[in-house]
Image (spheres, helix red, strand yellow):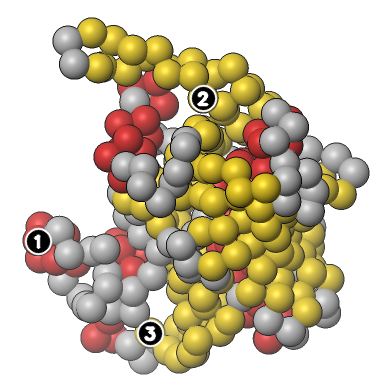
Amino acid sequence: MIKLEFSKVCTGGNDFVVVDNRKKILDVDHQSDLVEMLCARKYAIGADGVCFIELSEQADYQVRCFSNNGTETEFNTNGLRASSRVANEKEMAGNSHTIKTSVGIFKSEVSEKIVSIEVPQPKEIDIKHELEIPHNFESKIVHLSYVDAGFNHIVFRVEKTATFDSRGIGAILSNHTKYQPSGIDVSFYDVIDNHNLNISTYEVGVGGVVNSSGNGAVSAFLVAELKKEVASPLIVHAWGGLLKVSRKDISVIVEGEARIAYSGYITSDMLNFDIDKIRKKGFLL
């Protein structure tokens, strides 16, 4: 029987199934159904996403991350932090790691339960991004910000994230025709003070608001810093916990906890799971 090892890792509000695929037991290009199976809460392990660790000739290892709807993400900050925690546990690298992704090689640092990722200089930050959306019987121009930092993200400052309709407005913005066919993640933030802000993030791959988002934390920091609303270091407050975002020259460092909740093996029962039946019921989240 094939034994596929995994770890369930919690990263300050996000949770990931991290699979050790260094022996190439799985062809990751054809695992969207398995990703959905593993992420199905109450039916399987349950997670926001799945990360596969593989061998790399250019870095200590390679990581490919998928959202719980089975779509691959180019770069997932918290997913990479979760993977680094597992890689460190398995002694794939020491405390300093290099990680190959589809958009380049990234650096991480592991210190017990704290894991940081260095995000290089973004390709683009547009704080005058405009979007036309339906509003009653007319169209309305919404002014927000756009970030391309190895991942694409839009950011919108609101008066108070705690009472803002992040799910409803997030779904409208995320699924706008401008960002099709894949959609885009959206973060809403409000500033507490010069070194603290609140955030709420709608992720298109999850189809809802997540407890935490590393990509959202980076994007909100980049936008708010450029607008001179905050300064480094910044503590980003999400519903699921805290992330620290700091400036390092032209790069950004994201750090926070990454805890291995448990490890085990994916069973044949799991591999034979009838995902279509559960998918039709809409019980994947």
Q: Earlier along the polypeptide chain: callout 3 or callout 2? A: 2
Q: What distance separates the C-alpha of mark 3 from that of mark 1?
A: 23 Å
Q: Give me the residue at 72% from left, 51% from top.
A: 195
Q: Quadrant of the N terminus?
A: bottom left
In the image, 11: left or right of 265?
right
Q: What distance separates the C-alpha of mark 3 from that of mark 2?
A: 43 Å
In the image, 222: left or right of 175?
right
Residue type, mark 3 in image: Ile
Report if the CB atoms under discs 2 and 1 are less than 8 Å apart: no
Question: Which of these two is toward me, 133 or 34?
Answer: 133
Q: Is residue 169 above or below residue 271?
A: above
Residue type, mark 1 in image: Lys
Residue 165 in percent (x, y) is at 32, 42
Q: Earlier along the polypeptide chain: callout 2 or callout 1? A: 2
Residue sticking out furthest to the top: 138
Residue 116: which quarter of the image? bottom right
In the rendered image, which residue does mark 1 sit on?
281
Q: Is residue 181 above or below residue 14?
A: above
Mark 2 closeness class: few <14, some 14–19, many ≥20 residues within 10 Å: some
Q: Quadrant of the C terminus?
A: bottom left
Q: Is residue 230 above or below residue 129?
A: below
The secondary structure type at the circle numbered 1 is helix
In the rendered image, which residue does mark 2 sit on?
144
Residue 75 in percent (x, y) is at 59, 49
Residue 222: which quarter of the image? top right
Question: Which of these two is toward me, 31 or 185?
Answer: 185
Q: Earlier along the polypeptide chain: callout 3 or callout 1? A: 3
Which mark is in front, 3 or 2? 2
